[in-house]
Image (tube, grey):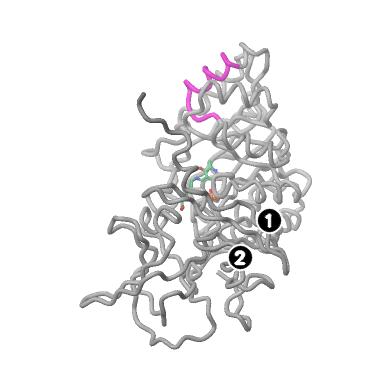
Amino acid sequence: MGLTTMGKDGLQVESVALSDVAARFGTPCYVYSRAALTAAYGAYRDTLQAHGLSDRSLICYAVKANSNLAILNLFARLGAGFDIVSGGELARVLNAGGKAKKIVFSGVGKSRAEMRTALEAGIRCFNVESASELEQLSQVAGSVGHRAPVSLRVNPDVDAKTHPYISTGLKTAKFGVAFDEAFDLYRRAASLPHIAVKGIDCHIGSQLLDPTPAAEAADKVLALVDRLAAAGIALEHIDLGGGMGIQYRAGEPAPSAADYLAPMLAKLTGRREKLVFEPGRSLVGNAGLLLTRVEVLKPGAEKHFAVVDAAMNDLMRPALYDAWHDIQRVGADSTANPMSYEIVGPVCESGDFLGHDRELALNEGDLLAILSAGAYGMAMASNYNSRPRAAEVMIDGASMHQIRRREDVAELFALESILP
Ligand code: LLP
């Protein structure tokens, strides 16, 4: 929300008309704002500063939300660290100028090859999620002559009250070490010669609009940190994950970074550990939109369809989570009458919708902006139906920079071969 303004040529991002972006780069196209990305990062940094925590905290952007090199590079320039979940994300971050010493590596199923690469790169910490992972990491570290810096991701059994697919902090989830087993696993970790115990982390879910569950999880984590310290295991950092929700719908009560972090930070003042956060969505979600064009209007007896050139393969969130994204017409005036439309893509599935029941005045050829698409949009895009992935463009003031060109069809099957 809040990314676009209405100018004389219709909706614009910063000083660039979206119609100019479409004319130059085509549609569908992801459009991001450098100023919005910078502001979202600034909100975290300023909040930490206001609590006197600037020099002992690190904001590790969760790369999975949007892993475009230009975005990673922008955050690296702003001083961010990174939360990665694969060797692929590690390679991206290093390629984009991120510092290994600021990378934390999350994920329930790291391969031995990924462990080795990350050890050799010299990352800051492995967020270990199980007893077996700890043993495997210890072996791999031994085999390459390193000590692996480790944090245990504990599962605090707190209900994040968000969509079940993005809720990760309950006992029933595959994530993290069960809270009751964490103390013993720390003792085991401390006894392993190729493991260096560094910290603790937790992440209870995503799109949290209320900070209470996160603060509750922080309480549990801090109690464990104190119990470990009493047993002689002093941790250097506490990583409270990501999860802050954003506003998708006008009026939705989304917190500011200051409001979301305050209850957690209140518990952390006066402590000596360093702090890490892993925000993804809240740094990029409202800094991006998906620009698409209406191909066909298809009035029906029950429903009117607007078939656009973006589809579920470009933005999967509506199909997968029943997520709601605001959809606005880019043009300033319309000759059409407003009607309720199903905004759908060309993919051959009834689940291929981008919005239901949207009141819009549309003509064929009109441009639409699907808002709040900066997080988990392009990052989750696929080539389903052999559709080339969209172009990505970054607006910076009055300039537009293509940060990923549209795929061409030949690239989609370039890795395939036919039988001899
Ligand atoms: N840290 C860990 C360990 C995570 O698993 C995640 C997200 C984050 C940080 C970042 O969380 P955020 O600040 O973005 O909420 N595809 C879904 C969201 C999946 C989130 C997965 N984990 C969606 O489109 O809503």
The secondary element bearing badge 2 is classed as: helix
Q: Nearer the viewer, residue 276 or 292?
A: 292
Rendered residue at 70%/27% (across/down): 122
Residue at screen point 20% across, 78% down: 301
Q: CA distance from mark 2 to mark 1?
A: 29 Å
Residue type at the position of mark 1: Tyr
- Ligand 1 under 8 Å from disc 2 Cβ: no
Q: Amino acid at mark 2?
A: Arg
Query: Any atom of ligand 1 within 8 Å of the CB at mark 1?
Result: no
Q: Main secondary structure of the magenta part?
A: helix
Q: Residues within 10 Å of mark 2 (few under 14, many from 20)?
A: few
Q: Position of residue 238 (x, y in %)?
A: 64, 39
Q: Are marks 2 and 1 in contact (CB under 8 Å)?
A: no
The stretch of residues the image draws in magenta is 128-140
Residue 379 against residue 116 in the figure, above or below:
below
The picture quadrant where one finds residue 353 is bottom left
Q: Quadrant of the N terminus?
A: bottom right
Q: Position of residue 326 (x, y in %)?
A: 46, 70
Marks 2 and 1, the one that precedes in the sequence: 2
In the picture, measured across the screen, residue 277 lies left or right of residue 414, that is: right
Kindly identify which numbered label has been placed on residue 24.
Answer: 2
Is 268 situated above or below 89? below
Residue named by callout 1: 41
Residue 176 position, x and y percent, is 48, 34
Secondary structure beneath label 1: helix
Give whichever of 181, 99 is nearer the camera. Answer: 99
Q: Residue at x 44, y 47 (%)?
A: 382
Q: Which quadrant is home to the C terminus?
A: top left
